[in-house]
Amino acid sequence: MEGYKGFWVFIEQLQGRISDVGLELLAKARELADATNTYVGALLLGDFAEDKAKELFGYGADKVFLFSHPHLQIYHSLAYTKLICQAVKAEKPEALFMGATPLGADLAPRVAARLETGLSAHCVDLRLGEDGVLEQIVPGFGGAMMAVIVCPEKRPQMATVMPGVFPKLEPQERQGEVVPMEVALEEADLKPKVVEFKAKEQKTVALEGASVVICGGYGMGSKENWQLLEEMAKLLGGAVGATRPAVDEGWAPEEVMIGQSGKIVHPKLYIGAGISGVMHHVVGVQDSEIIVVINKDPNAPFFEVCDFGVVGDATQVLPALIEKLKERLQVD
Amino acid sequence: MPEAVVCVKPIPDPKHWDRLSLDPKTGVLRREGIPTVINPLDKHALEIALQLKDNFGWDATVVSMAPPETTQTLREALAMGADRAFLASDRQLAGADTLATAYTLAGLIKKKAPHFQLVLCGNMSLDGSTSQVAPQIAHYLGVPHITHVSKVQTQDGSTFQVTMDLKLAQLVLEGQGPMVLAVTKEVNLPRLVNIMGILAAEKKPLEVLSASDLDLDPSKVGQEGSPTRVRNLFMPEIKRRREILKGEPEEVAEELVNRLHQVGML
Ligand SMILES: Cc1cc2nc3c(=O)[nH]c(=O)nc-3n(C[C@H](O)[C@H](O)[C@H](O)COP(=O)(O)OP(=O)(O)OC[C@H]3O[C@@H](n4cnc5c(N)ncnc54)[C@H](O)[C@@H]3O)c2cc1C
Ligand SMILES: Nc1ncnc2c1ncn2[C@@H]1O[C@H](COP(=O)(O)O)[C@@H](O)[C@H]1O
């Protein structure tokens, strides 16, 4: 559409630490902007000096719109919405992306509603259609189908994108422009007021970056059997993931759930044991280089989308596999 | 009486999702014969309203936008204890994306419960799965919203301490109505329906409204009012080896290790 230029990314931060998902989206925005001869804009809201904004050039941003104010250090939906909408109305970007994180899912719909534009949720890919319209790929109808969502008549085109879908760029020496933005807020913009901020203790979850992911499903049967996955992961230097039912059983923490409503992973090697292979889960692993599936039911749908499938009881196959791997890797 | 409005979405029962199919020609979802249930998180939203009713004498009003045959599903919300229900149901409203859905529900709330203190939603619908409707309703009502709500506390039924779960952190916010909250399953345990409730529900008001009853801008509802479109649907492309190994655990383990070695994984 005439007059709309630039791919924008909302840079999520928590206590001044920039989250990966914003950097991942900068990489995708860079690709889309290069393909269409336009620029990448980053929206950075927080209590930041210009130096922090400049870091974003290396990840692909040409312009960083910096909203710096002590009130912005902690997320506030109305304040953030107001400032972002003011910038969008003034600069008219073609598209605006945010992470499909709790914060992004709280903010993006409100921004989209105020701008009366379309928003698609939990995208797993973004690409340009032949007509130049942004195609937003959303796992639909339980994930068995992918839906291509477009927003042909309104701008900006907005999407929230799953963390881990796009690799971020290795920081490069690049130049850009920091655009300091005015932050004028009223008391009403800061309601309801934040009375407490509790950072949660971070268990180190190396899942997103792991080159080997060992994932267990409901078929693992018990917390004791789950140890087999941990052992396997340790042996291969990988991380353990889980399906939703396994998380529901308490065998693994929610943070390691893989799939449509959890994490997206793209390891070199993914091994799934006791997992039926419903698309809700499979969408989260389909970018793995090699997929190995262990399931005792030869008709499990996961076998349709695997590289190597082992028909057998995971509680027997895994110990045997661990032994063979130890032999091969010469460890004990 | 202060009033809580609960947004209840009837969805095809996830237990029967294997019976959902896509019409390959039209791309329309076929859901014939699949029973409808209340979106699970919406019961948690309703439970908050019912506790405010029990403890502070609030009114609990249910609103929904869905096809007319879902009235039975809304009766279940009445059986849990809601006082009344309003269902916006009209061909004109069909095909709505989240923006048009939120605009319509906000219109219904303005018409039927203009003095609400809280609008309570589920954080996500299982079928739509967007988590977008609640903040967008709040926009059209001109009130603040909080999503990912894992805890709601109040001493006096007027000031609320609300915990928003950001996964890596928690925010506790304090505020008074009117506002919109979208809740997760951590927030409470919804009550079960009993016989008394079912009998009482039969006598409670359940009004079905058409688009023209709602003073809405026709260009903002249904498919026409939806900025997003489904361009097409495709099956995810699968190019995998699909080599299936069978045999005794030791044999298959050996074979698998060999294969992984061959493809450079070990
Ligand atoms: C909106 C929505 C979003 C969802 N998002 C996600 C998501 O992000 N991630 C996710 O994982 N799920 C998600 N789900 C749930 C998803 O639909 C499936 O229910 C889930 O992925 C199935 O997990 P599973 O394969 O572990 O369990 P099951 O489907 O119960 O499968 C267990 C499998 O284990 C096999 N098995 C049993 N015993 C053994 C044994 N001893 N050895 C070997 N194999 C054995 C069985 O043959 C079976 O195939 C979502 C659902 C909905 C509705
Ligand atoms: N058609 C609808 N009727 C009533 N409430 C709805 C409707 N669609 C969404 N909601 C509410 O919005 C919440 C989030 O839905 P969604 O944005 O689809 O994930 C639901 O849990 C409901 O509380």
Image (cartoon, coloured by chain):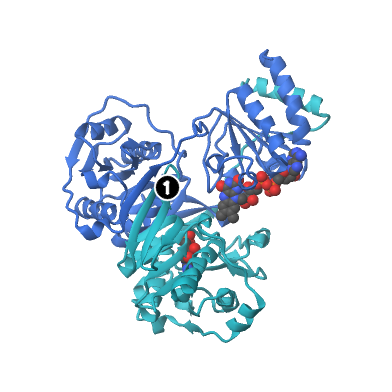
Chain colours: A blue, B cyan
> Is A299 placed left or right of B167 in the picture?
right
**Residue A260's spot in the image, x, y percent?**
54, 48
Q: On the image, which quarter does residue A199 sit in? A: top left
Evaluate whether residue B173 shows in this view: yes
Mark 1: amino acid: Leu
Image coords of residue A162 (percent x, y) = 46, 44
> Helix, strand, or loop for circle 1?
loop
- Quadrant of image for the C terminus of chain B: top right
Image coordinates for residue B235, horizontal then vertical, percent = 58, 50
In the depicted structure, whether residue B159 falls above or below residue A212: below
Q: What x and y, as percent, mark residue B136?
A: 37, 63
Question: Left or right: A127 with respect to B264?
Answer: left
Which is more toward the observer, A181 or B167?
B167
Q: Badge 1: few (under 14), some or many (20 or more) residues near its Cα, within 10 Å?
A: many
User: Of B53 and A273, which appears nearest the observer?
Assistant: B53
- The quadrant holding residue A12 is top left
Give the vertical position of A170 relative to A143 (above or below). above
Residue, disc 1: B166
Q: On screen, B14 above or below B241?
A: below
Residue positioned 44% across, 59% down in the render:
B152
